[in-house]
Image (cartoon, grey):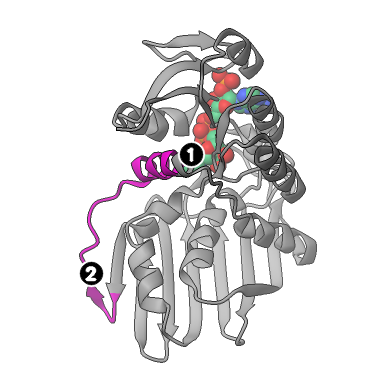
């Protein structure tokens, strides 16, 4: 059995409590030793108000998992790498593309594992979909990623601020799946961003890509949706159709449901990170964030009514 990795968890908010803490508790390969958060504390471990205090007080830690919003990811990751830790980044891996690339190079020079995680890629539909699509000719892809922002991001001011991504915060999950399952690269051709009059980031976005052979990939992201979220990806090929539903928990091929097993995204993320550390490898794929950045570069902005939480 390989060594148990002593872990620090930083940014104790919704995703840390909903997913990271249970996944870590269930993984014998990690021992949660300490947490850092300005206001929150986790029972049963040592707690610090900042990552710097945590790193100074806990030099024996092997690895740090970062769950705070993207705007502070770069500074926190740099501090952890400078202290010699392996680092896992929640998605999106940063507030800008270049900072993620600098982190990747810094980690490589330091001989540490940087894992820019995309939890939706670990949904059970993703690898079977990728295998099924690998030998098929893609005709079209339609992505519908729609949810109620008040249900999924209550009171989260950072998502409306620069670097917070707005509706791309969930939309990037769809892009992380699409970039994993499609056999070819795709390039953005147009985008429309719907930005409330009182926010810095979009509440909805429509994107159109073309894959390398010209097949359209259309995406509709919308936070003004009802209580039943729609997280779907439909792919038409020359030889049948595929539909991913419920964010990757369900898979249909030619209209028939496929048995893909239970959802275990975060346990799978931590297992993957541990395997990367054991092999001395990293995993930093910035393509989903690059597509969002391209939408911001190429997109037409439409002002919509102010958002009230
Ligand atoms: P959240 O509930 O706002 O929690 C993040 C925590 O980070 C906050 O509670 C806060 O804790 C800390 N934090 C906030 N601003 C900070 C700052 N400026 N400096 C240092 N710490 C700060 O957000 P979340 O939903 O957990 O999302 C965090 C990340 O996880 C995002 O990148 C998001 O995309 C990703 N994610 C979220 C979900 C989801 O369903 N919510 C799912 C998957 C991934 P303290 O005030 O105690 O410091």
Q: Can you identify the residue that label 1 sits on?
A: 277
Asked if ligand 1 lies within 8 A of label 1, the reply is no
The quadrant of the rendering that contains the C terminus is top right
Q: What is the magenta range?
A: 253-275
Between 124 and 170, the residue placed more toward the observer is 124
Kindly indicate the quadrant of the structure image that contains residue 18: top left
In the structure shown, which secondary structural element does the residue marked by tag 1 occupy?
helix
Q: Residue at x 63, y 33 (%)?
A: 157
x and y, in percent, of residue 189 in the image = 70, 76
Between 25 and 108, the residue placed more toward the observer is 108
**Vertical order, 110 against 101 (above or below):** above
Disc on res. 23: none
Residue 118 visible in the shown view: yes
Please identify the residue farthest to the bottom as the structure is shown: 238
x and y, in percent, of residue 288 in the image = 60, 58
**Vertical order, 98 against 82 (above or below):** below
Q: Quadrant of ligand 1?
A: top right
The quadrant of the rendering that contains the N terminus is top left
């Amino acid at each position: 059995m390989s060594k148990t990795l002593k872990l620090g968890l930083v940014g104790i908010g919704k995703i840390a409590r909903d997913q990271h803490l249970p996944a870590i508790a269930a993984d014998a390969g990690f021992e949660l030793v300490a947490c850092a958060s300005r206001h929150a504390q986790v029972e049963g471990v040592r707690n610090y108000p900042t990552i710097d205090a945590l790193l100074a007080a806990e030099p024996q830690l092997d690895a740090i998992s970062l769950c705070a919003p993207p705007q502070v990811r770069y500074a926190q990751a740099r501090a952890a790498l400078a202290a010699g830790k392996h680092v896992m980044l929640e998605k999106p891996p940063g507030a800008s593309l270049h900072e993620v690339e600098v982190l990747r190079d810094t980690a490589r020079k330091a001989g540490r594992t940087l894992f820019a995680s995309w939890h939706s890629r670990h949904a059970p539909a993703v690898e079977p979909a990728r295998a099924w699509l690998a030998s098929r000719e893609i005709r079209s892809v339609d992505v519908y990623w729609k949810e109620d922002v008040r249900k999924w991001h209550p009171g989260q001011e950072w998502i409306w601020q620069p670097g917070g991504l707005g509706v791309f915060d969930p939309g990037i999950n769809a892009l992380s799946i699409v970039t994993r399952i499609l056999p070819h690269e795709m390039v953005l051709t147009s985008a429309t961003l719907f930005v409330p009059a009182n926010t810095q980031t979009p509440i909805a976005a429509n994107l159109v890509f073309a894959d390398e052979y010209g097949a359209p990939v259309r995406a509709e992201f919308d936070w003004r949706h009802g209580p039943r979220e729609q997280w779907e990806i439909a792919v038409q090929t020359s030889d049948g159709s595929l539909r991913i539903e419920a964010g990757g928990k369900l898979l249909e091929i030619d209209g028939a449901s496929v048995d893909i097993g239970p959802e275990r995204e975060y346990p799978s993320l931590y297992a993957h990170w541990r395997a990367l550390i054991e092999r001395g490898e990293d995993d930093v794929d910035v393509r989903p964030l690059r597509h969002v950045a391209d939408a911001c570069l190429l997109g037409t902005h439409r002002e919509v009514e102010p958002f009230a939480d």
